[in-house]
Image (cartoon, rainbow, N blue to C red):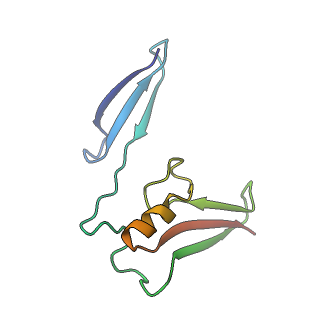
């Protein structure tokens, strides 16, 4: 059985969940990050003239041709993008999109 505890990481700022396995020997720290904003948008001022802000980075050593990383902090598969930004953008009039790592 696993046990969970909440605390602060070394910086004293990000909450984390400590997971201990059945043996009690191994611990894994999982950061719990929550995006909060005043107007409901993640992107208050960057490139607002674009429908959706998406940047790409070309990398030579990747296992997949394209790997999308979340920038809206709402992905259920964080740090990878699961498309949650689309619902957020529609609800808040925002234009945040993923960071795409592209294999060269």
Residue at (40, 80) in percent of width and height: 46
Looking at the picture, tell me which residue is in the foreground, 21 or 70: 70
- Residue 53 x, y percent position in the rendering: 50, 76
Q: Does residue 66 appear left or right of residue 71 in this picture?
A: right
Residue extending farthest to the bottom is 49
| The C terminus: image quadrant | bottom right
Residue at (34, 57) in percent of width and height: 35
Residue at (43, 38) in percent of width and height: 30
- Residue 77 x, y percent position in the rendering: 54, 47
The total of numbered circles placed on residues is 0
- Residue 28 x, y percent position in the rendering: 46, 30
Residue extending farthest to the front is 91
Q: Does residue 41 appear left or right of residue 54 in this picture?
A: left
Residue at (35, 80) in percent of width and height: 45
Decide: is 4 above or below 13: above
Q: Does residue 7 appear left or right of residue 30 in this picture?
A: left
- Residue 40 x, y percent position in the rendering: 31, 66
Decide: is 37 above or below 1: below
The quadrant where residue 72 appears: bottom left
Decide: is 99 above or below 33: below
């Amino acid at each position: 059985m696993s046990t969970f505890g909440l605390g602060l990481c070394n910086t004293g700022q990000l909450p984390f969940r400590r997971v201990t396995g059945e043996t009690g020997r191994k611990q894994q720290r999982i950061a719990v990050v929550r995006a909060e904003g005043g107007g409901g948008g993640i992107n208050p001022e960057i490139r607002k003239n674009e429908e959706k802000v998406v940047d790409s980075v070309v990398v030579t050593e990747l296992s997949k041709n394209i790997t999308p990383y979340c920038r809206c902090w709402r992905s259920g598969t964080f740090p990878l993008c699961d498309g949650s930004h689309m619902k957020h953008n529609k609800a808040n009039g925002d234009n945040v999109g993923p960071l795409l790592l592209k294999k060269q």
